[in-house]
C-alpha cells in the first residue's frame, strides 16, 4: 500500500528518526558516564535504589549527612574508604548520581515522544513491537544496573564482573538495536550482498565477545596487570597462565585476571584482522560500500591504538573511557553495514 504525504508515517518520518538517534546518543552518553563512574570507583556510593525519589539529590546538610551515614554502613567504606570525609564522599556520589539521572532521562526521552508518535498513528504494527522492545530493554537495563551494584553492597566491596559484563553488554545491544530501527526511518541506498552480510555478522560476533571480555577486564581490574606491549612481561604467553589453569581449570578463562587480559589482548588481534578482511572483501567485490568500510578500518586502527595506550599507561580514566566508546562506535558502524547489505532497494 502506497503512503500519501499526509500519512502519519510519512509526516513524522524525520522526527522519528531524530528521536531514535537522540536515544542512541543518550545511551552512548550513559555508557561513557558509566565508564567514568567505574574508573573513579564511584559505583557503590549510592547504597539505595529509589527509582522515583532518588531523582532528587541531597540538598541540605542534614540530607548529605544521612546519605554519608548510609554509605558508612557499606563494605566499601569499611574496607577501603573509612578515611573519607563528607566532601570526598560527595565527589564519588556525583558520578553515580549522574549515571542514574541520565538513565532516567533516557527513559523519559523514549516514553514521552514514543507515546506521542504512537497516539498520532505514526507506528505500524511492526514498529509498535520494536518500540515496546526498546522500552522493555531500557527497563531491564536499569534493573541490571541495580543488580550489579547490589553485588558490591553485601560482603565484598566489588561488583560482580559477570554482572558488570551483563550490564555493559545489554547497554551496547540496546544502542545497536535502537540504531538499527533508526536506520529504517532514514532512506539510504542498500546493496544486497549475502557474502558481505555473513562476513559482517562474523566480525560482529567476534567484537561482541571482545566487548564482554573488556567488561571482564574492567571488573577484575585486569588492565593493571602486565602493562607491557606487545608481550606480557617478557613472554608472549606468560607462565602464570599455566598456573592459573592448574589451579582453577576452565573457570580461569572468566575469573582469573591474567588469563582474562591474555584473551582480551589476542581477541583484539582477531577483531583487527576480521575488520581488515571485511574491508578487503568490500574493496574487491562491493566498492559501493567502500566509504562505510573505510570508516570501519579507521575506527579499528584508532581503537587498537587506544587499547595499547590504555594498557601500557595502566588504564587512565580518559583513555579507558575513550577505549570503551571506540568499541561502541565500531559496533554501530558494523550495524550500519549489516543494514545496508540486508535489504534490496
Image (tube, grey):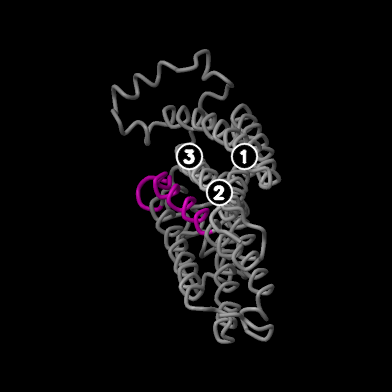
The front one of 153 and 279 is 279
Q: Earlier in the sequence, mark 2 or mark 1?
A: 2
Residue found at the far top of this picture: 234
* Residue 293 picture location, percent across and down: 65, 42
The front one of 268 and 39 is 268
Classify mark 2: helix, strand or loop.
loop
Classify mark 1: helix, strand or loop.
helix
Tag shown at residue 111? none
Query: In this figure, what is the number of numbered marks?
Result: 3
Question: Is residue 81 in view?
Answer: no
Q: Is residue 331 magenta?
A: no
- Picture residue at 58% right of the left edge, 79% below the top: 112
Q: CA distance from mark 3 to mark 1?
A: 23 Å
Mark 1 — residue?
A: 285
**Residue 133 picture quarter:** bottom left
Tag shown at residue 193? 2
Classify mark 3: helix, strand or loop.
helix
Q: Are marks 3 and 1 in contact (CB under 8 Å)?
A: no
Q: Earlier in the sequence, mark 3 or mark 1?
A: 3
* Residue 317 picture location, percent across and down: 63, 41
Neighbor class of circle 3 (other Cα within 10 Å; few <14, some 14-19, many 20+) is some
Q: Are marks 2 and 1 in contact (CB under 8 Å)?
A: yes
* Residue 97 picture location, percent across and down: 57, 61
**Residue 309 picture quarter:** top right
Q: Nearer the viewer, mark 3 or mark 1?
A: 1
Q: CA distance from mark 2 to mark 1?
A: 10 Å
Mark 3 — residue?
A: 206
Quadrant in the picture for the N terminus: bottom right
Q: Please report the bounds of the magenta region as a residue range.
A: 153-174
Amino acid at each position: 500500500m502506497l503512503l500519501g504525504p499526509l500519512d502519519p508515517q510519512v509526516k513524522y518520518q524525520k522526527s522519528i528518526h531524530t528521536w531514535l538517534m537522540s536515544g542512541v546518543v543518550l545511551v552512548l552518553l550513559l555508557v561513557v558516564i558509566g565508564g567514568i563512574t567505574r574508573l573513579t570507583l564511584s559505583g557503590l556510593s549510592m547504597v539505595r535504589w529509589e527509582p522515583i525519589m532518588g531523582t532528587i539529590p541531597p540538598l541540605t546538610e542534614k540530607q548529605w549527612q544521612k546519605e554519608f551515614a548510609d554509605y558508612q554502613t557499606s563494605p566499601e567504606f569499611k574496607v577501603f574508604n573509612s578515611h573519607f570525609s563528607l566532601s570526598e564522599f560527595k565527589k564519588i556520589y556525583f558520578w553515580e548520581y549522574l549515571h542514574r539521572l541520565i538513565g532516567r532521562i533516557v527513559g523519559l526521552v523514549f516514553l514521552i515522544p514514543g507515546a506521542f508518535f504512537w497516539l498520532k498513528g505514526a507506528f505500524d504494527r511492526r514498529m509498535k513491537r520494536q518500540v515496546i522492545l526498546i522500552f522493555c530493554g531500557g527497563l531491564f537495563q536499569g534493573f541490571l544496573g541495580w543488580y550489579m551494584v547490589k553485588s558490591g553492597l553485601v560482603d565484598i566491596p566489588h561488583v560482580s564482573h559477570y554482572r558488570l559484563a551483563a550490564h555493559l553488554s545489554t547497554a551496547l545491544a540496546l544502542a545497536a538495536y535502537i540504531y538499527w530501527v533508526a536506520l529504517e526511518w532514514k532512506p539510504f541506498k542498500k546493496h544486497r550482498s549475502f557474502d558481505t552480510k555473513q562476513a559482517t555478522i562474523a566480525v560482529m560476533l567476534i567484537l561482541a565477545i571482545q566487548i564482554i571480555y573488556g567488561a571482564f577486564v574492567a571488573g577484575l581490574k585486569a588492565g593493571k596487570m602486565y602493562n607491557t606491549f606487545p608481550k606480557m612481561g617478557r613472554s608472549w604467553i606468560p607462565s602464570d597462565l599455566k598456573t592459573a589453569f592448574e589451579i582453577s581449570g576452565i573457570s580461569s578463562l572468566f575469573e582469573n585476571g591474567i588469563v582474562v587480559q591474555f584473551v582480551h589482548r589476542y581477541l583484539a588481534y582477531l577483531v583487527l584482522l576480521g575488520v581488515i578482511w571485511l574491508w578487503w572483501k568490500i574493496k574487491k567485490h562491493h566498492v559501493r560500500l567502500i566509504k562505510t568500510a573505510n570508516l570501519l578500518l579507521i575506527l579499528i586502527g584508532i581503537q587498537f591504538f587506544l587499547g595499547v595506550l590504555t594498557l601500557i599507561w595502566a588504564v587512565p580514566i580518559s583513555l579507558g573511557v575513550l577505549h570503551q566508546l571506540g568499541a561502541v562506535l565500531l559496533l554501530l558502524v558494523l550495524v550500519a553495514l549489516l543494514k545496508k547489505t540486508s535489504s534490496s532497494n
